[in-house]
Image (cartoon, rainbow, N blue to C red):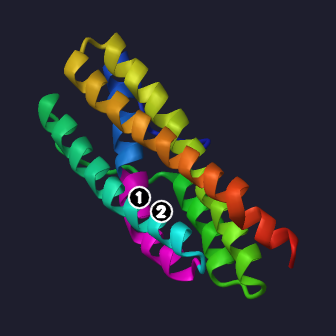
Amino acid sequence: MGLFTSTEFKDLKCLFIDQLQDIYDAEQRLTKALPEMAEKASDPQLKRAFQDHLEETKNHVQRLERIFEMIDEKAKAKTCEAMKGLIKEGDEIINASGDDAVIDAALIAAAQRVEHYEIAAYGCIRNLAERVGCPQVTELLQQTLDEEGDADKTLTNLAEASINREAARA
């Protein structure tokens, strides 16, 4: 949010909806970025991890749309400046040249920054859903939060098991 924002948070539900709109935009942006990351990745397992997470991210978008319906709100995106910045950093790697393994390590680092942002966002939104009395929404958000955590663990395992070792030899 900018210094001169016109957003008004008159109650916790307003904040909850605002945060849903923000992560909705973030997930939509990510569905456009992940295919480029998969294309750039040279390691087959990393490429597959990005492709798998793309499908999962599409499901996250659909899950958010279902949540908007459940709370009788229109599914509307609010520009997620954080995700725009994270994707811009990822674009720098996608456009970089150099050793394939080092590029793969850089892609993992960029992707984990995205995952950590999403984990923080979904954790906060899940707590807000709980506080405004939406237990079914809370469960759906927890499911997404768990999937984001799993994606982060997958990236860590790829980095530690092989990719960072290969990059260190470059």
Residue at figure coordinates x 76%, y 63% from the top left: 164
The image shows residue 70, relative to residue 132, as above or below, that is: below
Residue 95: tell me if it is visible.
Answer: yes
Tell whether position 35 is magenta: yes
Amino acid type of the residue that numbered disc 2 sits on in the rendered structure: Ala
**For this view, does 124 lie left or right of residue 94?**
left
Residue 10: tell me if it is visible.
Answer: no
Q: Which mark is residue 126?
A: none
Specify the farthest residue to the bottom.
Answer: 97
The image shows residue 123, relative to residue 37, as above or below, that is: above
**For this view, does 169 lie left or right of residue 61?**
right
Check contact, mark 2 vs mark 1: CB within 8 A. Answer: yes
Residue at figure coordinates x 34%, y 48% from the top left: 24
Q: CA distance from mark 2 to mark 1?
A: 6 Å
Q: Which mark is residue 53?
A: 1
- The segment highlighted magenta reads 25-41
Secondary structure at badge 2 equals: helix
Expressed as whole percent of the image width and height from the top left, the position of residue 103 reads: 71, 76
Quadrant where the N terminus is found in the figure: top right
Q: Main secondary structure of the magenta part?
A: helix
Label 2 sits on residue: 49
Amino acid type of the residue that numbered disc 1 sits on in the rendered structure: His
